Amino acid sequence: MKAYRNALYGMILVLVLILSGCSDNILPAALESIAVTPATLSLTAGDTSPALAVEATFADTSTADVAATDVTWSTSASAIATVSKGVVTAVAPGSATITATYQEKTATVAVTVTAADTQATLESIAADPATITIEVGQDSAAIAVTASYDDETTEALAAADVTWSSSAEGTATVAAGVVTGVAEGTATITATYDGKTATTAVTVVAAVDTGIIPNGSFTQGLTDSWELWSEAGNTTASVVDGEAEIIIPATGNAWWGVQFWQEGISVPEAGDYTLSFDARASVARDMRIEIAPTEVAASPTNLDFLLGTEMTTYEATVNLSGLGATPTLKLNIGLGNVSSNSQAATVYLDNISLKPQESALTTYSLSVTVDDGTDPIEGATVKLNTNMEATTDASGVATFTVEPRQYPVSVSMSGYVGFSSVTQVSADTDVPATLTVAAPTEDAYLYGTTETVDVTNTLAHWDSGSAFNASYADDPTYNPVIEVTTSSNLWGSGTPGFALAFTQYSTGAAVGYDNLKFKLKSTELTDVAVKFPGATTEEISYAIADYGVDLGNGWTEITVPLSGYGDLGSNTEVGILRFQAGLTETAIYITDVYFDVAQ
C-alpha cells in the first residue's frame, strides 16, 4: 500500500514538472499598440459617422479587434465634434481630434467638420429704380432686380432670368429690363422671378428738344453725360422726379468750388445760340454757367443767374465763333461761391438746351455811373463778367445793352480803390459807383512769419496740382512759413512747377503800393513769376539773381515792382508761380509776403 502511494506521488510530481515546463506556451502575449480606422474623418455639421474600428497589436505580432465599448473615447473640442462608443457626431464647422484609449495605449482620429449646405429660400425681389420718367421714343437704362433670401443674403438677378411685362404696352414696352417710351402716359413695369414680383412706375413724356446738349432733360439719369466735382468733396447729384437735384452743403472759396458739367458737346456750326434751362433752389442763390470751346484756346463765355425758389425758365444768348475744324465745347455750371448771393442750398435743374437762335432775346440798358464822390470819373474801366467791358465817358457813364439776368459789375481806375457789386437786371438799370483815392502809407502784409496780416485773403493753389502748408514750422530761420509742394505736371502742362495764390482780398487792394515783396527759399529756382489777374499786364517773370537779395540760409527776398502791371484797380488776387523744366525739388518755402510803400 505504501509502495502504491509513493508511486502515485511520483506520478503527480512528474505531472507538475511537465506542466511547469509548458507555462510559456499558454500565457497571452503583451499588448504593443492600438490603431483606429479610419484615421481621418470629414463630416458635415449635424452628421454622425459609422462606429470607429479599433484593432490591437501584440508583442508576438498577432492582432485582435477591440470592442468599442471596451475603449475609452475622448474629443479635443466638443463644440466641434463629440464621440460615444466610437460614433462621432459633427457639431459645428472646425477641426477636432478623437482619442481612443485601451489598456493605456492610445490612437487618434483627425476630424474635419464643414457647414451644412442649406438652400436659402427666396423671400422677395426689388426693382431699381422704383420710378422712371422717359421721353417718347427713348430707352431707359436697364432696371436692376435684386433677390433677397431668408438667410439675409441678396443676389443681383440677370435681366434674362426675369420675366418682364408692361401694364400698358401702348405707353411703354419693356425688354430685358429696358423700358421704351411709346406714347405719353403712365405704365407699370412688372418683374417676375420664381413667383415673386416687383414693379417700376413709368411716366412717358413728350420729347424735349435740348438742341446740342445730350440728355439735357436728365431722362437718362446722369450716367455718361453729366459729371460733378466739389472743392469740399461733399456735394451730391442725382435725378429726382426727372430733375437733376444737386445738394450743396458748402460753396467753397470761388465760383468753381462746385461744378456740374458736360463736355465734348458737338457744335454743328458757328453763330448765335440760345441757352435755355429751368432751375430753382431751396433758398434764393446764384449760379454761373461757363461755356468754353474745348479744341481751341478761347476765352469762355460766363453767364450769371439769380435763382428763385420756384421753377423758372432762364435764357441767354451765346455766341459760338472762332471754333476749330471739329468744334466741341464744355458747358460748366458753377454752383460754388459766385458772389455774395451764393449760399449752401439744394439746386434743381431741368431741360438744359443750347439751340441755334431763331430770334433775338429781350434786352435792357445797364448804365454804370462812376464818380469820386463829387465829380464824374472819365476813363474808368467797367466790366460785366469777363465778357463785357467799356470805358466811362466824360460824364462818368459806361452803358451796356444786356439781357435780363445777374451781372457782376467791377469798376477800376489807376490811383483809386476798385468798386464791385452784383446787379440783377430785369428792366433798364443804373448802377452808381463811387471810387475812393488809394493812398497807402504803410506796408500791407498778406502773410508774415511774425507780422500781422493786414490784407485779409485766402490761400489757394489755383487748382494747379501743387499744394501748400501755411504753418510749416521746421525751418531753422523763419517759423512758421508756407511750404509749397511742387507739381510734376503743373496745370497739365507736362512741366514741373508750383502755383501759390493769395485770393479774395478787397478789389484794388494793391493800388497805390510800389512793390510786392516776399521771401523765397529754393535750391533750384532761377526765375519766379508773379501774376495779378485783372491787371493791364497780368503776369511777369523775374530772374531771382536780378530781383532778389540774399538773406542767408538759402533765403532770398524778391522785390516785384507793381508799376509793370498797369491798372490794378479790379485785381482781387495775386499768384506766385513757376514752370521750370527739370525741377526736382519737391517743396519750396515762402514767407513775409507784403505790399510795400517806398520809403
Image (tube, rainbow, N blue to C red):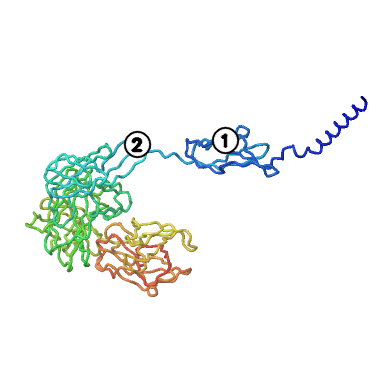
* Mark 1 secondary-structure assignment: loop
Q: Is residue 568 above or below residue 29?
A: below
Q: Residue furthest bottom?
A: 546
Q: Name the one closer to the observer, 382 or 312.
A: 312
Task: Tell me the quarter of the picture where residue 530 sits.
Answer: bottom left
Q: Is residue 383 above or below residue 78?
A: below
The residue under the point 40% across, 75% down is 545
Number of numbered labels in the structure image = 2
Give the crowd class for mark 2: few <14, some 14-19, many >=20 residues within 10 Å. few
Q: Name the one closer to the observer, 2 or 546.
A: 2
Name the spot of residue 435 as percent of width and height, x first. 22, 58
Q: Name the one closer to the observer, 51 or 264.
A: 51
- Compared across the picture, whether 13 is left or right of 412 comes to right
Name the spot of residue 393 as percent of width and height, x first. 13, 63
Q: Indicate the amino acid at tag 1.
A: Gly
Q: Where does the C terminus fall, quadrant-wise?
A: bottom left
Q: Residue furthest left?
A: 359
Q: Where does the N terminus fall, quadrant-wise?
A: top right
Q: Indicate the amino acid at tag 2.
A: Thr
- Compared across the picture, whether 520 is left or right of 236 comes to right
Residue assigned mark 1: 86
Q: Residue furthest top?
A: 1
N-term mark: 2 or 1: 1
Name the spot of residue 268 as percent of width and height, x first. 13, 63
The residue under the point 20% across, 55% down is 289
Task: Tell me the quarter of the picture where residue 378 sits.
Answer: bottom left
Residue assigned mark 2: 121
- Compared across the picture, whether 527 is left or right of 55 comes to left
